[in-house]
Image (spheres, grey):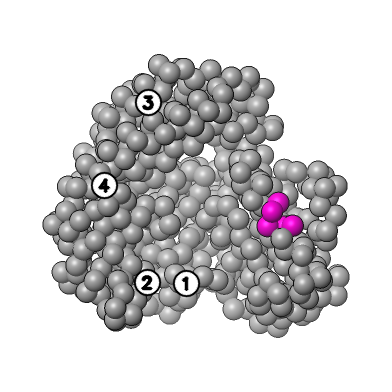
C-alpha cells in the first residue's frame, strides 16, 4: 500500500504525522507521492480560522487524486476533526475516514478493515519516521493537552487536559531520534513547565532535562513554549549551567495590559511578567526571549495597545509574534462581543510589529562581530551560500544565517560563527571554527518501552 501524509499546523502535529508514518511502514506501507498514493492522510489544524481553511483546502485538493491518481482512501485526522467531525462529515463526503486527535491509534485498524493495509506487523522502523530535508532538527513532545483556561484558546477542546508522558518514554524517544541523526531536539508542549505535575512522581522539567542530557549525546536541546510562571530558580540554573540547552526561551505572554490579560484569563499580569523577564536575564546571560501577543481581543482599547507597546519598549525582547484575535467556538471569548473591527485589528498588529522590528534590529546589532554558536542546516554548492542558524534562531520561525565559507560542511555540524551584517531577521557571517562535526559518536543503547506501552501511540 502506497501512502502519503500531509501535515498542517504546529510542530506537535509534525510529531504525530511522523508516528503515523512509522505505523504505516510497520504494516507494509510504502511512502509515495500524492499522485501515486493509495492512502492519503491529511493531519489537520483547527487552531484559528485561517488554519481551518488551509486544512479544508488541503483535504479538497487531496480528494482530486481519486480521479487524477490512485487514491483509494482519504483520511482526515487531527485537531480540526476532533472539534468539527460531524460538520466535516456532512460537508466533505469525499473523505472516507475521520479520526480526531484522540483517536490516533485507530488509523491502522481502520485501514486493515478496509483491506488496504496488511494486518501483520511486517517491520518496525522506529516510533517516528521523518519526512523532510532537515533530519538533524527534530521535535519531541513531552506532554499532551493543556490545563490553562485562557479565554481565547481552543486547544483544550482539541487535545484535552494536560497529560505528561513517562520520563523513561520521553528519553527513549530522544534516543531513537538521535539514532536517526538528530542533532537539535526541540522540546514542545502546550506548557513545558507543567511537565510531571500530573504524574506526581517527583520528576519535573528539570529532572527530565537532566535525564535527557545523561542518556543522549544530543548537542542542542531547545525549550519551546514555556509559561514564565514555571521558570523556577532551579530550572533557570539548569539552563544557565548546561551548554547543551540553548539559551533561548519561547514564553507566551499574549498581552501586557492588565485589563486585557484579566479578560483573557491569563495567569500573570504585567508586573509579574516584567519581574520574570528580569529574573530570566539575570540568571541566563545572553538568553534570547521570544513571545507571542494577540491584538484585537474583545474590549481592547487604544490605551491597552499603548500599554503593550510601552511594555515591549521596556523589556526589549529579541522576537515577538503578533496575531489578531480570532473567535473560536466553544471558548469563553466566543461569548464576548467581537467589538474590535478587523481593519483596526490589522492596524494594531502592524503598529506592534513595526515597533518590534526596531527593537529586534537593536538586539541583533549587538551580536555583530561577536562569536556565536550556530548549527549548519542546508549546505549549498561551490557558488552558493550555506544556510545555518545561530543559537538564538529557532527552526522555521526566527530567520537564518547565511555563510559564504562553509562549503562541504555537513548538516548538523556545530560551528562558531562571526556575524557581520543583519537584514531584518537574517544574518550574514563567516565561520570562525568547527566545534563539533555532525559525524560525532552517538550512543547505541536505547531504553526499553515502559511496561504497558503498546506501539507508537501507547502513551
What secondary structure do most residues of the magenta stretch adopt? helix
Horizontal and vertical percent position of residue 99 = 75, 55
Q: Would residue 387 be visible to someone looking at this image?
A: yes
Q: Which residue is mark 2?
A: 378
Q: Residue at x 42, y 34 (%)?
A: 350
Horizontal and vertical percent position of residue 122 = 70, 83
Mark 2 vs mark 4, CA separation in Å: 25 Å
- The mark that comes first in sequence, 3 or 1, is 1
Q: Residue 124 magenta-drawn?
A: no
Label number found at residue 308 = 3
Q: Residue at x 30, y 71 (%)?
A: 385
In which image quadrant can residue 320 be found?
top left
Q: Which residue is mark 1?
A: 133
**Magenta residues, start to end:** 56-60
- The mark that comes first in sequence, 2 or 4, is 4
- Mark 4 lies on a secondary structure that is loop
- Tell me if residue 86 comes above or below residue 443 in the rendering: above
Label number found at residue 312 = none
- Mark 3 lies on a secondary structure that is helix
Q: Which residue is mark 4?
A: 287
Horizontal and vertical percent position of residue 348 = 44, 28
Mark 1 vs mark 4, CA separation in Å: 28 Å
Amino acid at each position: 500500500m502506497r501512502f502519503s501524509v500531509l501535515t498542517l499546523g504546529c510542530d506537535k502535529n509534525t510529531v504525530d504525522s511522523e508516528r503515523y508514518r512509522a505505523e504505516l511502514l510497520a504494516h507494509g506501507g510504502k511512502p509515495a507521492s500524492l499522485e501515486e498514493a493509495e492512502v492519503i492522510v491529511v493531519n489537520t489544524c483547527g487552531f484559528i480560522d485561517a488554519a481551518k481553511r488551509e486544512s479544508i483546502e488541503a483535504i479538497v485538493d487531496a480528494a482530486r487524486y481519486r480521479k487524477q491518481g490512485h487514491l483509494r482512501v482519504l483520511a482526515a485526522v487531527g485537531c480540526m476533526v476532533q472539534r468539527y467531525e460531524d460538520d466535516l462529515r456532512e460537508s466533505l463526503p469525499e473523505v472516507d475516514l475521520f479520526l480526531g486527535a484522540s483517536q490516533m491509534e485507530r488509523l491502522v485498524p481502520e485501514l486493515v478493515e478496509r483491506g488496504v493495509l496488511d494486518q501483520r506487523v511486517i517491520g518496525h522502523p522506529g516510533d517516528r519516521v521523518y519526512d523532510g530535508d532537515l533530519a538533524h532538527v527534530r521535535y519531541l513532545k513531552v506532554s499532551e493537552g493543556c490545563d490553562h483556561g485562557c479565554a481565547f484558546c481552543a486547544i483544550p477542546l482539541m487535545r484535552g487536559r494536560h497529560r505528561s508522558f513517562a520520563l523513561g518514554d520521553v528519553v527513549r524517544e530522544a534516543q531513537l531520534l538521535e539514532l536517526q541523526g538528530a542533532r537539535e531536539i526541540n522540546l514542545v508542549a502546550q506548557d513545558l513547565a507543567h511537565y510531571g505535575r500530573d504524574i506526581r512522581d517527583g520528576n519535573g522539567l528539570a529532572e527530565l532535562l537532566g535525564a535527557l542530557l545523561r542518556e543522549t549525546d544530543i548537542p542542542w536541546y531547545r525549550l519551546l513554549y514555556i509559561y514564565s510562571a514555571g521558570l523556577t530558580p532551579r530550572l533557570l540554573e539548569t539552563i544557565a549551567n548546561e551548554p547543551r540547552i540553548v539559551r533561548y526561551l519561547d514564553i507566551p505572554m499574549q498581552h501586557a495590559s492588565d485589563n486585557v490579560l484579566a479578560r483573557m484569563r491569563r495567569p500573570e499580569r504585567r508586573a509579574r511578567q516584567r519581574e520574570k523577564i528580569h529574573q530570566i536575564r539575570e540568571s541566563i546571560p545572553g538568553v534570547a526571549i521570544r513571545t507571542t501577543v494577540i491584538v484585537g481581543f474583545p474590549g481592547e482599547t487604544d490605551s491597552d495597545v499603548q500599554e503593550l507597546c510601552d511594555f515591549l519598549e521596556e523589556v526589549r525582547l529579541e522576537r515577538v509574534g503578533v496575531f489578531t484575535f480570532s473567535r473560536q467556538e466553544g471558548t469563553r471569548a466566543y461569548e464576548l462581543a467581537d467589538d474590535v473591527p478587523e481593519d483596526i485589528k490589522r492596524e494594531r498588529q502592524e503598529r506592534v510589529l513595526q515597533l518590534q522590528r526596531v527593537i529586534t534590529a537593536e538586539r541583533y546589532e549587538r551580536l555583530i562581530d561577536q562569536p556565536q554558536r550556530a548549527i549548519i542546516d542546508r549546505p549549498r554548492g561551490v557558488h552558493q551560500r550555506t544556510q545555518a542558524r545561530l543559537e538564538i534562531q529557532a527552526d522555521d520561525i526566527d530567520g537564518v544565517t547565511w555563510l559564504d565559507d562553509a562549503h562541504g560542511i555537513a548538516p548538523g555540524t556545530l560551528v562558531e560563527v562571526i556575524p557581520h551584517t543583519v537584514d531584518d531577521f537574517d544574518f550574514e557571517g563567516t565561520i570562525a571554527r568547527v566545534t563539533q562535526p555532525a559525524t560525532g559518536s552517538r550512543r547505541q543503547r536505547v531504553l526499553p518501552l515502559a511496561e504497558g506501552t503498546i506501539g507508537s501511540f501507547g502513551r
